[in-house]
Image (tube, grey):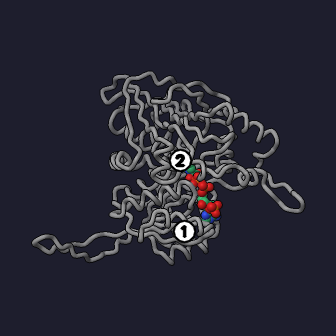
Amino acid sequence: MRFHQNYCTFAGKNETRDRYITMSKVIIIGCGGVGTVCAHKCAQNPDVFNEIVIASRNRAKCDAVARAIGKPNITTDQVDADDVDQLVALLERHRPDMVINLALPYQDLTIMEACLKCGVHYLDTANYEPRDEAHFEYSWQWAYRERFEQAGLTAILGCGFDPGVSGVYTAYAAKHHFGEMHTLDIVDCNAGNHGKAFATNFNPEINIREITQKGRYWENGKWVETGALEIHKPLTYPMIGPRESYLMYHEELESLVINFPTIKRARFWMTFGEEYLTHLRVIQDIGMASIEPINYHGMEIVPLQFLKAVLPNPQDLGVNYTGETSIGCRISGTDKEGKPLTYYIYNNCDHHKAYEETGMQAVSYTTGVPAMTGAMMFLKGLWKKPGVHNVEEFDPDPFLEVLNKQGLPWHEQFNIDLEA
Ligand code: NDP
């Protein structure tokens, strides 16, 4: 990390004290719901984030967020993050310690390239996805391991909530409670109500690509494929009650089963309401979820991208959003003494409280706060490890300590019915 050695003078009552402080600068790329929350949270921690630059395709959005936060240490810039040269110029202009990538998964590789060229550390919240194929896996980003290691740079992958906190929770369970973990169920419930007939809680294009994919889970050393949202059952969420939960593939399963090889079965569940699923089915049936370009009056358009343009903007949902999200990990196995153990660690987040603090709903909040926390871990030297790493490879303790104080407190339950 590049430390600016700034010489400061502290004047006490009867004494003058001199000391060195370290300074750090981050660039947040992407200024949607998640980028906005992350900028707010970085600004709330000026002792760690001394300078913050928000850069996105549309600079006016960054300016509006910077104005709303109203702190002198925030500046803005413009970049097309699909273009490595533009990214390199951005990083050269600002010389940050770390890029917090909160643009879309399509930009992960170009931003990683630029970080390597400029000697800048990297963090993101979603793994790379090629634009023309709704397919996500870590192989593209893991291929950068050696180059980051040789450059002495740290890349932290998937540091939102899921992926992100879900991996940190699992690492915490392994460190403190389990001798061996055997089953892992990541459970993600949004019991909020935004009052719209149909809207997605984060980027609609990315969200619909994810949900309409085939399901997949890990069992006895191999992946088992299912139809999209084919397997479902009610699961009970704290303070919420039972909600129909659907088995989906989710990216953190890929790294977790490698980093915790005693896990025999790993699954991911997400809740959806009937109304949402009906709309989704119609959208698919009429071809609007397609990513194949079509010719419309001489213009090439991608139906799903057009749909995104007419759907409600997730950033505007916060104002009337009520209810909570509840995301956690349900784990079974044996404890440090070899006795059977079931364990549930989770956070509930209130949409309205998130909105009051940052102007964004809880789905953006639960992603932006962990992104800030991961960057803080790196800047404090606690998660500094050259190479490309998933979050569960780092010490979970300081991360969870900060998360508790930054608006995402977590809770544990032992030896309960996991409903698995
Ligand atoms: P939004 O669509 O609200 O925001 C994306 C931002 O990226 C926009 O500001 C957009 O600019 C900008 N952007 C897009 N393309 C480019 C480009 N080529 N160059 C520069 N900027 C660009 O998405 P969200 O904030 O909801 O999500 C952000 C990320 O967080 C996504 O990758 C998403 O997958 C991830 N995520 C992760 C979660 C987790 O728990 N791990 C949960 C939720 C989201 P413009 O406004 O001009 O379009």
Q: Nearer the viewer, residue 312 or 58?
A: 312
**Image-based side of 133 in relation to 418, left or right:** right
Q: Residues within 10 Å of mark 1 (few under 14, many from 20)?
A: some
Question: In the rendered image of this protein, does residue 59 appear above or below residue 185?
Answer: below
Residue 135 in sight in this render: yes
State the quadrant of the N terminus. bottom left
Q: For the residue marked with disc 1, what is the amino acid?
A: Asp
Q: Is residue 172 left or right of residue 199?
A: left
- The residue sitting at the front extreme is 320
Image position of 92 with respect to 360: above or below:
below
**Residue visible at 66% across and 33% down?**
229
Q: Quick check: which quadrant has ligand 1?
A: bottom right
Left or right of 383, for residue 273: right
Q: CA distance from mark 2 to mark 1?
A: 20 Å
User: Mark 2, residues whose alpha carbon is within 10 Å: few (<14), some, or many (≥20)?
Assistant: many
Which percent across, then down, holds residue 322?
Answer: 53, 40
Residue drawn where x is 12% and y is 70% of the image = 13
Q: Does residue 127 appear in the picture of this structure?
A: no
Q: Which residue was labeled with disc 1?
A: 63
What is the total number of numbered labels drawn onto the structure image?
2
Residue 366 lies, in percent from the top left, at 48, 47
Quadrant of res 375: bottom left
Front-most of residues 404 and 174:
404
